[in-house]
Image (tube, helix red, strand yellow):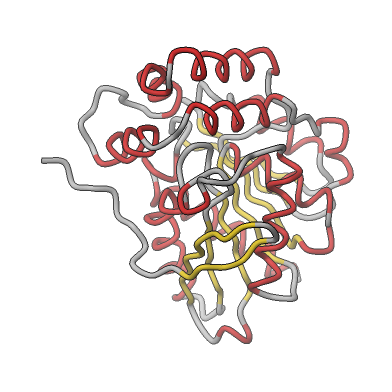
Amino acid sequence: MTTPWPRFPHSNAIRVDDHETLLSQLTTGPTDEASTILFVHSALLDRHAWYRTMRKIADRLSSTGNPFTLATYDLRGHGAAAAESIVSIDQLAHDLLAVSLTLTSKPVHVVGLSLGGAVAQAAALDSPDRIASLALLGTSSRFSRTAMYDRAARGKTNGVAGQVDDTLARWVSDPAADNEVNGYIRHALAHTTPERWAQAWEALGRFDVVDRLPRLRCPVLALAGTRDVASPVEALELIAKSVAEGTVEYLDAAHLSPLERPAEVAVHITDHLLRVLGRD
């Protein structure tokens, strides 16, 4: 029997404007002195997607003596906030900024995967004073509207269950494997309604910040999976070369690298955070 995907044992309910969600946190030192890292999950999953990577990052940061608060939450339309409608990436970015203010008055470091990376970019463009740095994984600054809307329509017409195999083929290195990652994804998709499925993809289809990327002034790490067919290397390279302080790094991984390669992802993100802190 496949081991279930691990879940954060403790979470707190927080109010984010018009809805409630759940927030999970790890700390590496005194919270009053800590820098805050906010992790934003990918479409159709939930905050638990970050469990293994956050644990490994927390372990690495603990050894440096730098205090950090690592936090993640369920995006609206996902997980504990699944009842809420998704209107746009800007709406999700507004939620991210509201969550950050429940954690600290200081700027936060944001790590975003796929949809979460789009949300992170939008938040940094909307409120640059609130974002200390970005680490973006498996994402883009523009998604094909035709492809996203077609995907949304297939889910509404044929049901989400009919989209599972194609989704796994885009997201993971071995779609046929009976492992904890694929089991977690299948479980999440089984609890995704056609309406939420469509809203997530349509929001991504309307997202386009390519022309606004040069306005980003915070340090940006673009971590590209060399086997990522959902967000190809070129999409991450474009982000890194378009921003004022962009770095692209590469990982031998598929789309959901934090789930399949948490140790390697943790090294890249920890090094990125320490570089930013060292510069400050």
Residue drawn at 65 percent across, 26 percent down: 202
160 versus 277 height, above or below:
above
Occupied quadrant, residue 36:
bottom right
**Image position of 157 (left or right of 97):** left
**Image position of 20 (left or right of 91):** left
179 versus 8 height, above or below:
above
- How many numbered marks does the figure carry? 0
- How far across and how far down the image is residue 240, in percent? 73, 38
76 versus 224 height, above or below:
below
Which of 83 and 269 lies nearest the eye of the viewer? Answer: 83
Residue drawn at 72 percent across, 49 percent down: 93
Residue drawn at 66 percent across, 47 percent down: 221
Quadrant of the image for the C terminus? bottom right
- How far across and how far down the image is residue 165, in percent? 35, 19
Which of 209 and 65 lies nearest the eye of the viewer? Answer: 209
Which of 100 and 56 lies nearest the eye of the viewer? Answer: 100
**Image position of 75 (left or right of 265):** right
Quadrant of the image for the N terminus? top left
- How far across and how far down the image is residue 259, in percent? 39, 44
106 versus 238 height, above or below:
below
The furthest residue to the left: 1
Occupied quadrant, residue 278:
bottom right
Residue drawn at 52 percent across, 19 percent down: 156
- How far across and how far down the image is residue 22, in percent? 50, 62
